[in-house]
Every structure is written in structure tokens, then in C-alpha cells.
Image: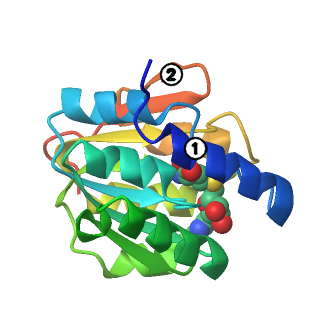
Amino acid sequence: MYTPMSDLKDATLDHRRTHGCGSHPVVDGAQLAAWAIQAGARSAVEIGTFLGYSAACLANAGILVQTVDRDPVHVALAQRHLNERGLANRVNCMTGEAVEVLADLPAGEADLAFFDGMEVSVAEIEVLARALRPGGLLVVSNVKLGSEAAEVRELIGGWQPWEDGEVLFAVKPPRAS
Ligand SMILES: C[S@@+](CC[C@H](N)C(=O)[O-])C[C@H]1O[C@@H](n2cnc3c(N)ncnc32)[C@H](O)[C@@H]1O
């Protein structure tokens, strides 16, 4: 069966072996794109570009993506992969610390906010929550990792989040800032 961007996922896994950065591609990019489509998303903000696999899956579904990664090697490789697949015009790859870079984005505009960094933190979820529009979908991978996971759940407790395995979902309430 054809899986969109499976070649890019394979390249990402190869990079993980050779670069030693410990990063990993999102488990299932097609599933991520399906969640985004189901939520009616046309725009997304992502923390954790890596080699662009998840961004490519979203862009391939017609979604405009703003993605950030602190590792310039990852960003350069992601831009190359997106160019090769004709998706570069739908993805803005930014380099730097997510909390600083995403603070410059307009507030309350993104339909989907996706955390795919390593260990989730309150500061990262705050900056994603700011970028998300009321009614937009927050997706947090690796939610069980890191020392701030409990605080993150508390931060968005009022958003009535739900979890499926390692992934947390929440919809930003209409009047949340
Ligand atoms: C799990 S990988 C992302 C996988 C990617 N979404 C994919 O599907 O291939 C995590 C990436 O997030 C980046 N990262 C983690 N925390 C970050 C932060 N606070 N700011 C910017 N980049 C971050 C790492 O450099 C790494 O490339």
C-alpha cells in the first residue's frame, strides 16, 4: 500500500542513525494529516521540523505549515526534502528556539498547533496556544515524556483535553486568549 511520504520517513530514520541527535519522525504522518483534515485545518504551526516529514504530510494535504527547529542541520535538510517534493511553497521552515521564534507569529490564527519536540514544556505549549485560533486543535506528541508533562496537562485542563497513547489532543475554547 502507498503511504504518502514513506520515503521521507525512511530518510529521517537513516538520519537518526547517522546524526546521533536522538530525534525520530512522527510515528504516522498520514494519521497526523487525517486529524488535521478532520479538524478542517488549512494552516498549522509545528514545533519540531526535523527532516520535514510531518510538515510534508500536512503540506501534501493542502495545509500551510509554519515549522520551527533549533537544529540548523535539520532545517536545511527539511528545506531540501520539501523542495524535492514540490512542497516548499506550503511550508515556512524557521530556525531557532520555538519559544522565541513562535512568539513573533500572529496570535490566534493557526487552525492546528502541533508539538513534536522531544520533551514537552509549559513554555512551548503556551506559545503554541497563543498561535492557535479559538476552536483550533492542539496536538501534543510525546506527552508522557519530560518533567513538565503534569503542568502542561494542568495548563490546558480547561480545554477538556483527551489522550490516545502518547498523544494529547485539545480544542482551544472560543474565548481563550
Ligand atoms: C521528534 S523530532 C521531530 C520529528 C518531525 N516532526 C518529523 O515528523 O519528522 C524533534 C525535533 O524537534 C526539535 N526541537 C525540540 N525542541 C525544540 C525547541 N524547543 N525549539 C526548536 N526545536 C526543537 C529537535 O531539534 C528535533 O529536530
Q: Is residue 112 visible?
A: no
Q: Quadrant of the C terminus?
A: bottom left
At a point 42% along the width and 39% down the height, the residue shown is 139
Find out if the beta carbon at label 1 lies less than 8 Å from the nearest ligand 1 atom. Answer: yes
Q: Is residue 149 left or right of residue 152?
A: right
Q: Nearer the viewer, residue 106 or 87?
A: 87
At a point 21% along the width and 32% down the height, the residue shown is 37
Judged from the image, the secondary structure of the residue bearing numbered disc 2 is strand
Q: Residues within 10 Å of mark 1 (few under 14, many from 20)?
A: many
Residue 102 image position (x, y, % from top left): 39, 73
Q: Is residue 73 above or below residue 121?
A: below
Q: Residues within 10 Å of mark 2 (few under 14, many from 20)?
A: few
Q: Amino acid at mark 1?
A: Lys
Q: Which residue is mark 1?
A: 9
**Label 2, label 1: how many angstroms apart (C-alpha)?**
24 Å
Q: Nearer the viewer, mark 2 or mark 1?
A: 1
At a point 73% along the width and 40% down the height, the residue shown is 145
In the rendered structure, find residue 163 and report the number of the disc placed on it: 2
Q: Is residue 78 left or right of residue 142?
A: left
Q: Quadrant of residue 92?
A: bottom left
At a point 64% along the width and 52% down the height, the residue shown is 12
In the rendered structure, find residue 134 and report the number of the disc placed on it: none
Residue 60 image position (x, y, % from top left): 28, 46
Q: Image quadrant of ligand 1?
A: bottom right
Q: Is residue 142 visible?
A: yes
Q: Amino acid at mark 2?
A: Glu
Circle nearer the N terminus (2, 1): 1
Q: Is residue 2 above or below residue 141?
A: above
